Image: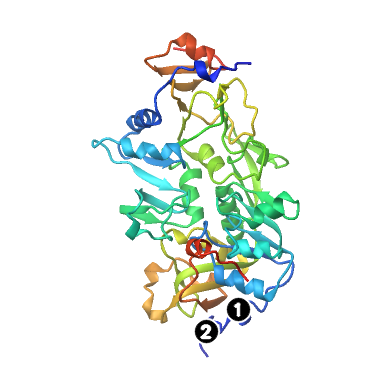
Amino acid sequence: MQINKIKKDMTEILSNVFDGATIMVGGFGEAGSPIELLHGLIDKGTKDLTIIANNSGNGRVGLGALIGQRQVKKVICSFARSAKGVTFPELYNKGEIELEVVPQGTLAERIRAAGSGIPGFYTATGVGTPLAEGKEEKIFNGKKYILEEALKADFAFVKAETADRYGNLTYNKTARNFNPIMCMAADTSLVQVKNILEPNEINPEHVITPGIFVQSLINIENPIIETNAIEEGMTYP
Amino acid sequence: MININTNDLIKGWDRNTIASKIANDLPHSSYVNLGIGMPELVSQYIKEDREIIYHSENGLLGMGPSPNENEIDLDLINAGKKPVSILPGGSFCHHADSFSMIRGGHIDYCVLGAMEISVTGDLANWSTGKGIPAVGGAMDLVAGAKNVFVMTQHLTKDGKPKLVQKCTLPLTGAAVVSRIYSDYAVLDITDTGFKVIQLNEDITIEYLQSVTDGNIYQ
């Protein structure tokens, strides 16, 4: 029998996602954001989610829509003040959603650390700022650093350009961003991918995420383009 | 407390002039991260005698200018989420590698804006203390880049000094700024105060001191 991580539909790929889960959502703004997987989660109605992402969604599409449906209790991100953000500010200003602000590089490194079995690390980022409050400090070679802990998740929702049935992935330009490290840091990585190729069709030298970090794939050939969707006034559901 | 009537202010260098001064100070073959907004202007003033490589923290090294309308690719954006291009010799990487370039001390210069800069080089530029807190990559950039250049107006819109004895706003980083480029002067952060490297032609050192809340010397 052959390994095949490709799922037949959204219901199957999301079948194990549970209420209260912590989910990493790839993307930087709309580039690399797994909009269809997030819409699948709206259809499924999964609640009380903690979302780890760089941003907090735009308009009422993708992450913005999931937050708007009140399925998210907490967002851990670096920048929750997007120009086109609607739903997060609405709930935040009413005190109905929690926010943990993490410097972008610390967010990436906490994710990478979790995926690499490193429970914490010291960094100069944030030293002397309000984001260092309550964190252990240590001096190395006369310079102060703070302790940051690894950030794990139950699931990673990821968007990739090309995959094979083993889960080997390539990305498109700056849509790569957080996606590869989130695949590493989550117990289960769910990937929506534009093109599925035969295993011998992806040059092993070009694989960005090796299949060991990926559990499930779904083929979304023509994903929604967030900018266009928002311009057209799209809302989901 | 210094508070200048904004009608009495001397007009300093415009933002293009400030950008060209920064551009002149970036050496050939530097790796540079330009903050979103005013610092982006710097790239327009790099002279022919040098090549600069621009880093965008969302995983792009070798960033080029905005593309033509028909060449826009929404998967190729900068840290401000605007469409950009990639130049020959450019590369993509994931976010942890991109921030290793910053945090590992590989970025030679970063240029960013400021709300306040203290005499000891503390920088506040991410939060007014109000609204939704959002930091992005600013704290990583100021902690990791080899040289941190600030590009700013010397005074706030209400005529308050941005160069201060002590920042009142939440810090982005402590003792991180190397040099300030304002509309009135170019100043280095030193152990004894703001050292004037270049003074605007229309301004005296006494005037500069009167609009700066911290020791200035030449």
- Mark 2 residue crowding within 10 angstroms, few (<14) / some (14–19) / many (20+): few
Q: Residue farthest to the bottom?
A: A1
Q: Residue at x 51, y 68 (%)?
A: A159
The dot on residue B153 is: none
Give the vertical position of A152 relative to B12 (above or below): below
The Cα atoms of the two marked residues, 1 and 2, are separated by 16 Å
Residue B121: x and y in percent read: 54, 26
Q: Is residue A83 left or right of residue B197?
A: right
- Amino acid at circle 1: Ile
Residue A55: x and y in percent read: 58, 54
Residue B119: x and y in percent read: 56, 21
- Mark 1 residue crowding within 10 angstroms, few (<14) / some (14–19) / many (20+): many
Residue A63: x and y in percent read: 61, 63
Q: Is residue B109 visible?
A: no
Q: Is residue B13 visible?
A: yes
The dot on residue A13 is: 1
Residue that mark 2 sits on? A3
Q: Residue farthest to the top?
A: B206
